[in-house]
Image (cartoon, helix red, strand yellow):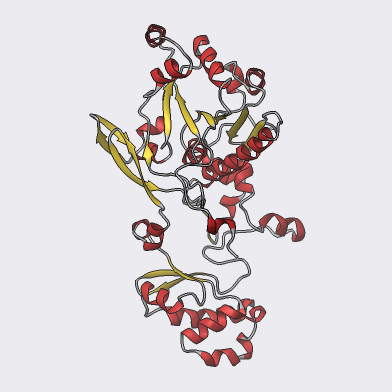
């Protein structure tokens, strides 16, 4: 019997079509959230200050397009959006924003708590304008708590959320090599926004979605919290090792490194057979997962065996030997990952076009069988759609728009 996913054919319709999102965010924690909503079909209107736009428009890498320097970094997080300029410090702009809120479903902002309220556009004001509005606020430390007003970057979240202290080589705490606090906060913001949307669809009111970068990082610390609260043990950096699972980590090979995760009895057996070491299966010191986890046995027996298997073989050879028998993955550079046939087959490379320049960027990891996401698309120039939004959406005439431009409101 076929399941529903097998009987549905993909359509050009996307799951969030009809949803209108006002994007008052900059950098990554926020733009990434709204980009994911746009990939799923939401109409996202990115609002920037005409004299102080999203400053990642000036982040590398750059390419020349339409006579201007275009940022690939900006392009990567702002595809499928419409671009509008509004100086929200101006009363005229605030009134225009409230008119838009009355016709929108979601507002996403990533200012420090209190900034929108000081502009006269805090959650309480917006919900008066539209009780169904979902107000998603992403910040370093959240809307409540003693540290809520502190400035923050991704590194602030990695440091205060505990992740920095656990990562890196022994004795050398090291930040995670990507902006995990920004990215995780954006992911949780999408989840929270969709949950709040579900409540509105059931007839309820909108609500605030409060996402903290520190909270997001703290929730990514695996077993560290429960281990500390249960045993008092404070995690320290372990490099590429796991705190108790072995063998499970990075191992050198002829042309680089691989990840090998042959720690269960099943996978250890398969690895021994694959590397023609069946005699190890009868070795009492190595017979059980618990024995192989023992630090002395691991260092004295298991580690030399595994290193011997890998030392004179290439990443490609090892991947072929492992096949689907046990976990083994080459540790790939970004150059290798971008050209990975599986990455390409999963449509994880897309094109974001900014100023006529096609930037190759990562695609959407969300795969829907009936209403698929769309990741390749256009990125707005600063304020590109301002006039169309004011005239076609808000019903203003061209003279009124020209006056707003002359006053610096848009």
Which residue corresponds to the image point at 44% horizontal and 82% vertical from the top-left?
A: 308
Q: Position of residue 238 (x, y in %)?
A: 56, 63
Q: Where is residue 64 in the image (x, y as percent from the top left)?
A: 24, 35
Which residue corresponds to the image point at 23% horizontal and 29% vertical from the top-left?
A: 67
Q: Where is residue 383 in the image (x, y as percent from the top left)?
A: 39, 23
Marks counted in the figure total 0
* Quadrant for the C terminus in the image: top left
Which residue corresponds to the image point at 71% horizontal and 31% vertical from the top-left?
A: 204
Considering every residue shown, the one lying at the far right of the view is 230
Task: Locate residue 167: give its quadrant.
Answer: bottom right
Which residue corresponds to the image point at 47% horizontal and 28% vertical from the top-left?
A: 45
Question: Vertically, is 258 above or below 152?
Answer: below
Q: Which of 353 and 398 is in front in this view?
A: 398
* Quadrant for the N terminus in the image: bottom right
Question: Vertically, is 158 above or below 406?
Answer: below
Asked if residue 243 shows in the view, the reply is yes
Name the side, left or right, on which 228 lies relative to 116.
Answer: right
Q: Where is residue 371 in the image (x, y as percent from the top left)?
A: 50, 46
Considering every residue shown, the one lying at the far left of the view is 67
Question: Vertically, is 242 above or below 410?
Answer: below
Asked if residue 142 shows in the view, the reply is no
Task: Locate residue 340: give its quadrant.
Answer: bottom left
Q: Nearer the viewer, residue 131 or 303?
A: 131
């Amino acid at each position: 019997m076929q399941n529903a996913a097998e009987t549905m054919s993909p359509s050009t319709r996307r799951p969030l079509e009809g949803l209108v999102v006002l994007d008052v965010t900059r950098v990554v924690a926020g733009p990434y959230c709204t980009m994911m909503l746009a990939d799923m079909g939401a109409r996202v209107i990115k609002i920037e200050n005409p004299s102080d736009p999203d400053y990642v428009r000036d982040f590398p890498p750059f390419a020349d397009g339409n006579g201007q320097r275009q940022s690939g970094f900006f392009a990567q997080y702002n595809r499928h959006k419409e671009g509008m300029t509004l100086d929200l410090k101006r009363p005229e702009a605030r009134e225009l924003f409230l008119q838009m809120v009355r016709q929108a479903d979601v507002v996403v902002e990533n200012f420090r708590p209190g900034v929108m309220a000081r502009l006269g556009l805090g959650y309480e004001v917006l919900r008066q304008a539209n009780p169904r509005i979902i107000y998603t606020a992403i910040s370093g430390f959240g809307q409540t708590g003693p540290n809520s007003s502190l400035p923050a970057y991704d590194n602030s979240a990695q440091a205060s959320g505990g992740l920095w202290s656990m990562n890196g080589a022994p004795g050398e705490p090291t930040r995670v090599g990507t902006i995990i606090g920004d990215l995780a906060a954006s992911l949780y913001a999408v989840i929270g926004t969709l949950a709040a949307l579900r409540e509105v669809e059931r007839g309820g009111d909108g609500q605030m979605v409060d996402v903290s970068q520190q909270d997001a990082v703290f929730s990514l610390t695996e077993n560290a919290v429960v281990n500390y609260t249960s045993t008092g043990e404070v995690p320290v950096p372990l490099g590429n090792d796991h705190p108790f699972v072995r063998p499970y980590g990075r191992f050198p090979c002829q042309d680089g490194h691989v990840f090998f995760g042959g720690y269960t009895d099943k996978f250890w057996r398969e690895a021994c057979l694959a590397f023609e070491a069946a005699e190890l299966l009868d070795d009492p010191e190595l017979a059980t997962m618990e024995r192989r986890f023992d630090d002395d046995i691991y260092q004295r027996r298991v580690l030399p065996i595994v290193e011997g298997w890998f030392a004179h073989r290439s990443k490609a050879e090892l991947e072929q030997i492992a096949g689907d028998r046990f976990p083994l993955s080459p540790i790939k550079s970004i150059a290798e990952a971008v050209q990975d046939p599986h990455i390409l087959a999963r449509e994880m490379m897309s094109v974001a076009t900014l100023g006529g320049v096609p930037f190759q960027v990562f695609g959407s990891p969300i795969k829907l069988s009936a209403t698929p996401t769309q990741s390749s698309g256009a990125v707005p120039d600063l304020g590109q759609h301002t006039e169309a939004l004011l005239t076609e959406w808000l019903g203003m005439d061209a003279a009124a728009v020209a006056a707003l431009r002359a006053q610096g409101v848009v």
